[in-house]
Image: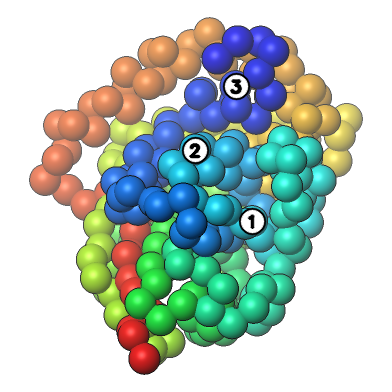
């Protein structure tokens, strides 16, 4: 990735959980046919890089975000409109999509059942709905450290801490969807590294930024926000190989559940 690449794509290469998420989603989506209609739904913590990489998997993609702050720059990166959706009205037709991917949105909304019902409406019978959320288990070590540091769910813009696989499956079943599998990713070492990065931005850098940063923003979401912390980000980029090596220690914890929940599901055929 050279310096002429869009800032979103260069920033994506210096992420941990987002790269892991892309890998997991790619495997669960499998081959995508060129004629398949696909949708990605996000909620604020997105600058368009994930959209870009999912589009490279094939299919005909559309985009929606439940928050407005990054939509303009996302649309410019993708060369396509990104819709500002509502929880109960994403702005698409009934049964429009063959596949729907939802990244970390359910924990942001007061009524996750309303969002899931809307996902069911816009997905064709037999279509795939793939959802990720934070795991939400506050007994896990990194989550206990997060609380002690004062990084509460409000700092992440969350209504709730997240969903365990069982909890997210229950939301899907209650919305008349059929879960076909669940898994987790991002174990302690990745989560601890991400927590350190988010803490530095929320508690230190964002407070000194000349560009306004809304509560719930845990990393630069626009080019202006990134420029305001450019010096710190260059330092982070230099040490990123060591941060990545630290995250690879997760391999030693293969027997533990991760901190991110992923549930694959289908809208039942009618």
- Name the residue at the front extreme: 35
Q: Is residue 234 left or right of residue 143?
A: right
| Quarter occupied by the N terminus | top right
| Local SS, label 1 | strand
Q: Which mark is residue 56?
A: 2
Write the residue at 71% across / 73% down: 91
Q: Is residue 91 shown left or right of residue 252?
A: right
Query: Which residue matches tag 3?
Result: 10
Precedes in sequence: disc 3 or disc 1: 3
Give the spatial CA distance, label 2 vs label 3.
Answer: 16 Å
Classify mark 3: helix, strand or loop. Answer: helix
Q: Quadrant of the C terminus?
A: bottom left
**Crowding at mark 1 (Cα within 10 Å: few <14, some 14-19, many 20+):** many
Which residue is at 54% across, 29% downward? Answer: 12
Q: Residue 138: which quarter of the image? A: bottom left
For marks 2 and 1, the one nearer the N-term is 2
Residue placed under numbered mark 1 in the picture: 63
- Helix, strand, or loop for circle 2? loop
Label 3: how many residues lie within 10 Å, few (<14), some (14-19) or many (20+)? Answer: some
- Residue 171 vs 81, above or below: the answer is below
Q: Earlier in the sequence, mark 2 or mark 3?
A: 3
- How far apart are the two marked residues, 3 and 1, measured between alpha carbons? 21 Å
Residue 192 image position (x, y, % from top left): 39, 36
**Residue at left offset 28%, top offset 74%:** 179
Residue 183: where, in percent of width, then height?
Answer: 25, 57
Comparing marks 2 and 3, which lies closer to the viewer?
2
Which mark lies nearer to you, 2 or 1?
A: 2
Residue lying at 64% horizontally and 41% vertically, measured from the top left: 48
Residue 198 or residue 20, whichever sits in front: 20
Specify few, some or many for label 2: CA neighbours under 10 Å numbering under 14, 14-19, or 20 or more: few
């Amino acid at each position: 990735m050279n310096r002429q690449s869009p800032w979103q794509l260069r920033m994506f290469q210096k992420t941990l959980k987002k790269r892991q998420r892309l890998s997991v989603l790619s495997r669960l989506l499998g081959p995508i046919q060129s004629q398949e209609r696909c949708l990605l739904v996000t909620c604020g913590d997105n600058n368009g890089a994930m959209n870009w990489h999912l589009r490279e998997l094939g299919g005909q993609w559309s985009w929606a975000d439940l928050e407005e702050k990054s939509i303009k720059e996302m649309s410019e990166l993708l060369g396509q409109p990104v819709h500002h959706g509502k929880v109960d009205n994403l702005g698409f037709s009934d049964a429009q999509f063959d596949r729907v991917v939802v990244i970390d949105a359910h924990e942001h909304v007061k009524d996750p059942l309303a969002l899931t019902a809307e996902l069911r409406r816009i997905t064709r019978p037999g279509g795939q709905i793939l959802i990720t959320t934070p795991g939400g288990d506050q007994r896990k070590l990194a989550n206990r450290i997060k609380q002690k540091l004062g990084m509460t769910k409000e700092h992440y813009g969350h209504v709730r801490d997240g969903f365990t696989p069982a909890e997210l499956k229950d939301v899907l079943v209650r919305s008349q969807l059929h879960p076909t599998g669940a898994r987790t990713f991002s174990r302690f070492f990745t989560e601890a590294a991400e927590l350190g990065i988010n803490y530095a931005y929320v508690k230190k850098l964002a407070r000194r930024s000349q560009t306004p940063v809304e509560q719930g923003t845990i990393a630069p979401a626009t080019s202006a926000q990134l420029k305001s912390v450019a010096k710190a980000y260059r330092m982070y980029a230099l040490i990123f190989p060591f941060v990545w090596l630290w995250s690879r220690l997760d391999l030693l914890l293969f027997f533990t559940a991760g901190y991110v929940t992923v549930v694959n599901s289908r809208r039942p055929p009618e």
